């Protein structure tokens, strides 16, 4: 095999007590038509049947079960074990769509100067029934990502290793959640990314997933806000704009829409208000972006 033509892809999967979903995750990687893949699974001492399932697939996956200190730490342990030229994070309850890895390799050949190639995803329920399509930012716009007005779907985003190493080859262990957001900002400050339309993954929405819990959304607000505060001066210097108020407004608008989805009307109203008083222009812009996304979703 010509390794330059068929680069190794590392699929990183942190897991803890996901016996209900981990087998489908593994099968989605094994069933890729692209075969030069290593699946690195980092288990945080699961107490359910996760380890048994992993053991059944030992010939096909690279897995370790050991204690870690959280999501980013687990990802970093898997990352340091990886050897791939291309990296993707696929959480234990998510799945790759058929042909996703082939698409990534093909488009990195077409767009070699981009650090990340990303697409779209299906959001599915516990039983795998499609709820709706989540479309990746089209076109890629760093400022909209930084201001949380658009979100790169991590399950559908492939990262070129050399660009990742150039930007800092880690996920921030100081963040209790949202390590992908920090990575997109850190990489995006130095390198470009490319949206390619197409469904690349299935993101599972269930009672145990972060996006279905108001308390976790509050933690996500804190993590994203710390990233915004950390990088706002660098962003302002490169783009010659003052982004701190815009980014906070965009973050609060994002939070409000998530609380609305969870039917937590009290927090939804609170954060819509914070978004508006923080930056009315950004509030209007965020509303327009949301409407366009909903229109695209309805038309799909």
Image: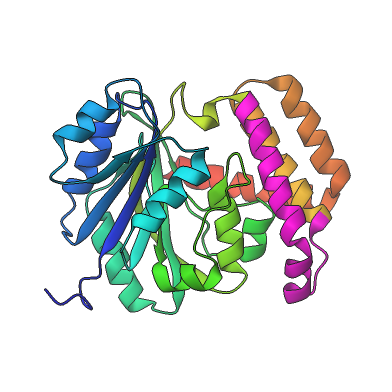
Q: Nearer the viewer, residue 31 or 58?
A: 58
Q: Residue at x 46, y 24 (%)?
A: 208
Quarter of the image where one finds residue 243: bottom right
Can you see residue 13? Answer: yes
- Identify the magenta region: 215-244
What predominant SS class does the magenta segment belong to? helix
Q: Residue at x 83, y 42 (%)?
A: 276
Image check: 160 left or right of 49? Answer: right
Image check: 236 left or right of 255? Answer: right
Can you see residue 151? Answer: no
Quarter of the image that includes the N terminus: bottom left
Image check: 105 left or right of 73? Answer: left
Query: Within the magenta stretch, is there residue 56?
Result: no
Rendered view: 54 above or below 149: above
Rendered view: 96 above or below 267: below
Rendered view: 171 above or below 259: below
């Amino acid at each position: 095999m010509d390794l330059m033509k068929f680069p190794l892809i590392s699929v990183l999967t942190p897991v803890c007590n996901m016996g209900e979903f981990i087998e489908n995750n593994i099968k989605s990687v094994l069933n890729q038509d692209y075969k030069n893949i290593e699946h690195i699974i980092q288990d945080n001492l699961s107490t359910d049947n996760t380890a048994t399932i992993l053991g059944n697939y030992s010939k096909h996956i690279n897995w370790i079960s050991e204690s870690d200190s959280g999501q980013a730490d687990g990802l970093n342990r898997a990352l340091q074990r990886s050897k791939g030229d291309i990296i993707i994070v696929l959480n234990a309850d998510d799945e790759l769509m058929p042909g996703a890895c082939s698409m990534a390799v093909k488009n990195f050949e077409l767009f070699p100067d981009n650090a990340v190639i990303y697409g779209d995803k299906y959001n599915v329920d516990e039983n795998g029934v499609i709820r709706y399509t989540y479309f990746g930012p089209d076109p890629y716009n760093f400022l909209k990502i930084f201001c949380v007005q658009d979100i790169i779907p991590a399950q559908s985003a492939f990262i070129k290793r050399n660009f990742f190493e150039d930007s800092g080859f880690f996920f921030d262990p100081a963040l209790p959640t949202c390590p992908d957001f920090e990575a997109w900002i850190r990489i995006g400050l130095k390198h470009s990314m490319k949206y390619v339309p197409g469904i690349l993954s299935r993101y599972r929405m269930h009672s145990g997933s972060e996006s279905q819990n108001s308390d976790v959304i509050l933690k996500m607000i804190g993590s994203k806000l710390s990233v915004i505060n950390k990088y706002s001066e660098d962003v302002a210097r490169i783009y010659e704009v003052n982004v701190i108020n815009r980014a906070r407004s965009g973050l609060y608008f994002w939070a409000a829409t998530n609380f609305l989805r969870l039917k937590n009307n009290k927090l939804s109203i609170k954060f819509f208000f914070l978004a508006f008083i923080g930056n009315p222009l950004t509030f209007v812009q965020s509303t327009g972006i949301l409407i366009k996304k909903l229109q695209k979703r309805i038309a799909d």
